[in-house]
Amino acid sequence: MAEVEPDRRGGAAGVVGAAAAAGTPEAGQRAAVLEALAGAAPHFGDDERARAFARFLAAHRGEAHVATLQDYPDPDAISSALAYRMLAARYDIEVDVVYEGRVSHQENLALIHALEIELTRYTDALPLDRYDGAVFIDNQGTTTRLTERIQQAGVPALAVIDHHAPQRLLRPEFEDIRPVGAAATIFADYLRSGEVLRLEEGRLDHVHLATALVHGLRSETGGFIRAGPEEFLAAVYLSRYVDPQLLESILRVQRSRGTMEVIRFALTERLVKGGFSIAGVGYLRHADRDAIPQATDFLLTEENVHTAIAYGILAGEGEREVVVGSVRTSRLTLDVDQFLKTALGSDPRGRYYGGGRARAGGFEIPVGFLEGALDAEQMRLKWDAFHRQIRARLLRAAGLEPGDDGAG
């Protein structure tokens, strides 16, 4: 497996030189910003990683790849997959972007429609064995049901490009996992290097790509609140190619009634203890899944709350039943990835139910044997069992005993 170690000698200086060479006032301003940030961003401006990525693509010229996203793709995953498709096309690599689940968040739908991004939702009619290899983008195979399907089809895992904590489930040929704020940061760095493709101002497909990546950066870092210097460098580089009106139209979407109801229920049912706000929201439709992280973001705004957690059971006729949850924190000393793994553990195959990155994470727990009971009383008992167990585990992992508050 080709894994490239980061060049910690200030590789971002190359970006500064390129910006200064452009000779325009705007380029001069970008150069000043980049100069100020370059020394603090060891994971951006890494030409060796970019060259390794270019070599990887060259070695697979003319193949067909499946770009595998998490079951519920977010703007970071969608924009990064678009970048992979465009970069791979330089080597005549055909790329289908595939997910198994749903795209339901209003901003995600707006992103796909406004930029005409082609995604494929997996069904049994899709012949996975037609692909020469799988590339896992913004995930490492632990947050998608496609991993097992791809393995059963005999399709090798060629690459993992991600920013989350290493999961070590896959052993790909090429791996670029960086401790940065977004997968879009990594793809912006590939573009910045010019090793595969140089963006051109005014070219529509390049403008769409830059706009998508900036949206991915913004979304993944909470409007750049959780951004590191790498994300600011990526945004500065992409800024000359972005269509601000198009980006604004993507962001100017309204929450659905279902999302508002989930947020209202989370606010009503939350338990606040020791700086943690924990809310079980009961059953919700698969179409409203993205209401969970939105409710979590809302809970985090409450006074004296440093960590918010919301979860519920996705259910519906003919749909897979699963508990999904989201975590957000402003506490710098809380390792979200380790917290969720400690709290919720793993399945019999050793795959953790939850994981994350700096200040954010999520979890998914199959309902399993109890799935499919639609009788009202059975559903109530099932929710009560999962709710009490999950909340008790989260409180214990936080060092807070459940006590007499109904948590178990």
Image (tube, rainbow, N blue to C red):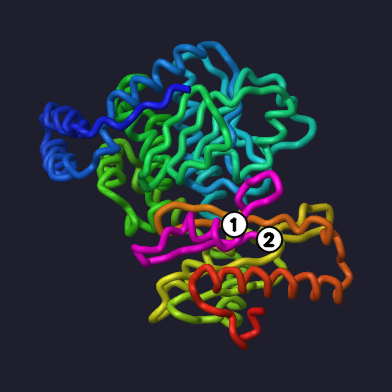
Circle 2 residues within 10 Å: few <14, some 14–19, many ≥20: many
Q: Which mark is residue 323?
A: 2
- Where in the figure is residue 216, as x and y percent of width and height? 43, 46
First in residue order: circle 2 vs circle 1: 2
Which amino acid, by three-letter code, is at mark 1?
Answer: Phe
Residue 386 lies in the magenta-colored region: no
Kindly tell me whether residue 42 is visible in this rendering. Answer: yes
- Judging from the image, what secondary structure is the residue with disc 2 in? strand
Q: Which residue is rendered at x = 32% and y = 23% of the image?
A: 198
- Where in the figure is residue 333, as x and y percent of width and height? 35, 63
Q: Which mark is residue 363?
A: 1
Q: How many marks?
A: 2
Residue bounds of the magenta highlight: 323-352
- Where in the figure is residue 243, as x and y percent of width and height? 35, 42
Task: In the displayed orientation, state which residue is furthest to the bottom.
Answer: 404
Q: Which residue is rendered at x = 68% and y = 51% of the image?
A: 347
